[in-house]
Every structure is written in C-alpha cells, then in structure tokens.
Image: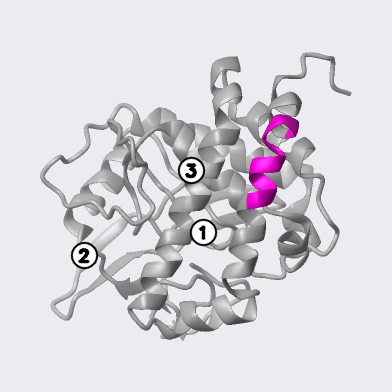
C-alpha cells in the first residue's frame, strides 16, 4: 500500500482493504499494523534481500504498540478504477516477470514451519514455498509503466507457485466475468488473451498451463470465503464493498462464468501457434 506523488510525515497511504486508513508514511518509512506473523515474515523479507531480491520492502523494526516499520518504496500504485497505464500489456508482462523473480528467490528460502501463517487466502494444498497470495494492483509498485516491487505480504503463506499465479491472474487479467471487470477496467479486457500473456511472461510450463484454469476457480472460491468471513465478523470495509459491488449475486455470476469458460482459457493457454 503506497501512494503516488510526494508525501509528508505521517501521511495516510491509500489502497487496500485489510488495513484501510491505518498505514502511514513517515519520511523514508512506512508504519502499519503488524501482522501476527510479523517476526517470521520480517525474517523472510530480509532473506529475500540477502538472496538478491530487491523488489520488496525491508523490515526496520516492530514497535511496542503492535505496529511495524518498513522501508517506503517510491513509485505508482494503481487504485480502482484502474488507470489505463496499469492495464497495458507491458504492465501485465512485467507483473508476471516480477512474480517469477519472487518465486525463484523464495524457493531457495526455507519456510518457518513454527509460524502460524494465515490460512485465509492460502493454498489449500499447502506447499514448501512462501507465496504472497495478494498480488493485486494495490500491492504492486510501478515505475515507468513496469512493475518494480511488491508490497503488503500480510497474507503470505506456504503454497504452490501456481496458486500464487492464479491469485495474481484474478486481479491482473482480470479473470472475472465482463460485468465485474467493467467496474475496475472500463476498457473491457480480453481475458483469455491477457491470461496467456501473464502465463508467457511468468514462464509457465505446459502442464501448469493445463492446470491453471481449475486453480483459478479454486482461488476464487477461497476469495469468496475470505470475504464471507470478513462480513460475518462485521468488518465495515468489506460489508460496504460487498453491497456496492453487487452482493453475493456478483460472486455467483463470477463463479458460473469461470466454470463456463474453463475450456476457453485452457485453449488460449495451450495454443502453440506463433504469436505476433
């Protein structure tokens, strides 16, 4: 979660729903509520840096009042309705490339098995690599139209790389029905083509391409359950968003559309014809 333009000490940063209004920039630092897994997560972020991945915040410290401080990453972040620059093929390709870099580095870092990683958006099949799980536009910092860094690792948990890519596809393609996509991307993106671009830029294997559409459906079900839990807990941000975005009927429509288009997505992902 960050903000475009100049910031003053104590500026509230826009973006995101989980910590809406609670993230502040103080000069070169960002201060935000610390997740329950902060210590393990900070260790992982520092390990990413030690292994050469420079596209994530560096943890600075945990405060006594339950907040964390991390380095501020300058750049642009897309907020809904997403600006045209965020929906270009160049932007999409750069997200796939950045996610691949993250995964290649994370694969070399052992997961802290003692940490109680959040299960809300975690891969139900588990895994040996720590996934971000929330690579939405609000959590990707851009410079010059290309993805430069990932932020907000609060929902990170062990899982398969393919799960993380499926979660990313939901937001960046986006793999949602046209009516839902129009609320965020008025231009009406070609979902099968954009999914293929994301898979190509990530470097997905043929077997993983065949599996991806079903994993996206699985991820969508997990996202729906996440929203349902937040609403049941009385979270005002999620309750308002659910109401403003069409309620559960929208989720029904989205899941029906995904099931009906699984063959279309699989065909686009496995098409071996030369692409111009």
Residue 88 point in image, percent of width and height: 78, 49
Which is more foreground, mark 1 or mark 2? Answer: 1
Q: Quadrant of residue 102?
A: top left
Which is more foreground, mark 3 or mark 2? Answer: 3
Does residue 93 appear anywhere in the picture? yes
Q: Which residues are magenta?
A: 256-264
In the rendered structure, find residue 61 and report the number of the disc placed on it. Answer: 2
Q: CA distance from mark 3 to mark 2?
A: 36 Å
Q: Assess whether residue 262 is covered by the magenta stretch.
A: yes
Q: Residue furthest right?
A: 276
In the rendered structure, find residue 103 and report the number of the disc placed on it. Answer: none
Residue 41 point in image, percent of width and height: 25, 52
Q: CA distance from mark 1 to mark 3?
A: 22 Å
Identify the mark nearer the N-term, 1 or 3: 1
Determine whether the residue tagged by mark 3 lies in a helix, strand or loop: helix
Q: Main secondary structure of the magenta part?
A: helix
- Residue, x 44% and y 83% (percent of image)? 21
Q: Is residue 213 left or right of residue 66?
A: right
Q: Residue furthest left?
A: 114
Residue 182 point in image, percent of width and height: 78, 64
In the rendered structure, find residue 218 and report the number of the disc placed on it. Answer: 3
Q: Is residue 203 left or right of residue 84?
A: left
In the rendered structure, find residue 139 and report the number of the disc placed on it. Answer: 1
């Amino acid at each position: 979660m960050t903000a475009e333009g100049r910031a003053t000490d104590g500026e509230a940063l826009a973006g995101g729903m989980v910590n809406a209004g609670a993230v502040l920039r103080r000069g070169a630092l960002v201060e935000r509520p610390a997740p329950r897994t902060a210590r393990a997560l900070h260790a992982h972020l520092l390990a990413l840096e030690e292994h050469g991945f420079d596209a994530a915040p560096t943890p600075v410290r945990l405060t006594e009042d339950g907040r964390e401080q991390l380095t501020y990453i300058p750049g642009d972040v897309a907020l809904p309705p997403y600006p045209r620059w965020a929906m270009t093929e160049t932007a999409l390709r750069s997200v796939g490339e950045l996610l691949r870099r993250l995964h290649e580095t994370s694969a070399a870092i052992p997961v802290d098995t003692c940490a109680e990683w959040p299960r809300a958006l975690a891969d139900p099949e588990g895994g040996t690599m720590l996934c971000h799980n929330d690579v939405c536009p609000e959590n990707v910092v851009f410079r010059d139209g290309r993805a430069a860094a990932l932020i907000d690792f609060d929902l990170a948990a062990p899982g398969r790389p393919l799960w993380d890519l499926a979660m990313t596809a939901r937001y960046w393609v986006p793999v949602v029905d046209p009516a839902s996509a129009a609320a965020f991307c008025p231009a009406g993106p070609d979902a099968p083509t954009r999914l293929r671009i994301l898979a190509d830029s990530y470097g997905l294997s043929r077997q993983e391409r065949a599996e991806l559409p079903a994993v996206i459906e699985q991820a969508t079900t997990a996202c729906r359950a996440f929203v349902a839990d937040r609403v049941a807990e009385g979270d005002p941000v999620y309750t308002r968003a659910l109401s403003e975005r069409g309620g559960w009927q929208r989720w029904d429509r989205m899941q029906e559309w995904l099931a009906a288009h699984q063959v279309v997505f699989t065909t686009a992902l496995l098409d071996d014809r030369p692409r111009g």
